[in-house]
Structure formats: structure tokens, C-alpha cells
């Protein structure tokens, strides 16, 4: 099988209803052997400019962990 040792990962996405996908993806990444670096990031519906700025910062923080 696939061996994801020493690989870092995080989940992110937008949602319209419950927003559980990021939590489920985070668990799947962890179960798959990835080092999950944070709880993930969720944005509701279509992100506006302010939320997009938050998303960019999320990406920058993830990159720093690498």
C-alpha cells in the first residue's frame, strides 16, 4: 500500500450546510498516516474578499510548517 510517512497534510474547503467534510478529511488524512498539522479550515458558501484573505493566511501558515 501507500506509505505516507513523514508527510504533512491539512484539509480545507467551503461548505453550504453542515461543514463536516473538513473534519472527515482531517481524520482520513490522520488515519492514512499523514502528520496532520492543524484542524483544517472551513469557509461557508462562497468566500468573500475578507475570507479569501483568511484562506491565504491559512495557506502561508501551512507552508511554514513544511
Image: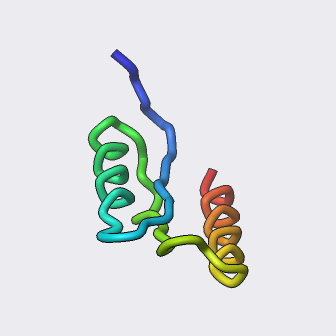
Identify the residue at horizontal 68%, vertical 73% (top origin): 52
Q: Residue at x 39, y 20 (%)?
A: 2
Q: How many marks?
A: 0
Residue 63 occupies quadrant: bottom right
Left or right: where 8 falls relative to 64:
left
Name which quarter of the figure residue 5 lies in: top left
Residue 28, percent from left and from top: 30, 44
Q: Is residue 49 left or right of residue 12?
A: right
Residue 55 to residue 23: above or below: below
Please give the name of the residue rendered at 49% of the width and 65% of the height, measured from the top-left corner.
14
**In the image, residue 44 above or below residue 32:** below
In the image, what residue occupies the spot 43% across and 30% down? 4
The spot of residue 24 in percent (x, y) is 29, 53
What colour scheme governs how the chains and residues are painted in the rendered image of this protein? rainbow
Q: Position of residue 44 (x, y in %)?
A: 47, 75
Q: Residue furthest top?
A: 1
* Quadrant occupied by the N terminus: top left
Q: Position of residue 59 (x, y in %)?
A: 65, 62
Q: Residue furthest bottom?
A: 50
Above or below for 43 versus 5: below
Amino acid at each position: 500500500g501507500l506509505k505516507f510517512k513523514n508527510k504533512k497534510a491539512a484539509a480545507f474547503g467551503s461548505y453550504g450546510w453542515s461543514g463536516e467534510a473538513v473534519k472527515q478529511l482531517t481524520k482520513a488524512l490522520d488515519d492514512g498516516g499523514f502528520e496532520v498539522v492543524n484542524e483544517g479550515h472551513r469557509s461557508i458558501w462562497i468566500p468573500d474578499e475578507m475570507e479569501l484573505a483568511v484562506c491565504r493566511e491559512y495557506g502561508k501558515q501551512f507552508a511554514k510548517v513544511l
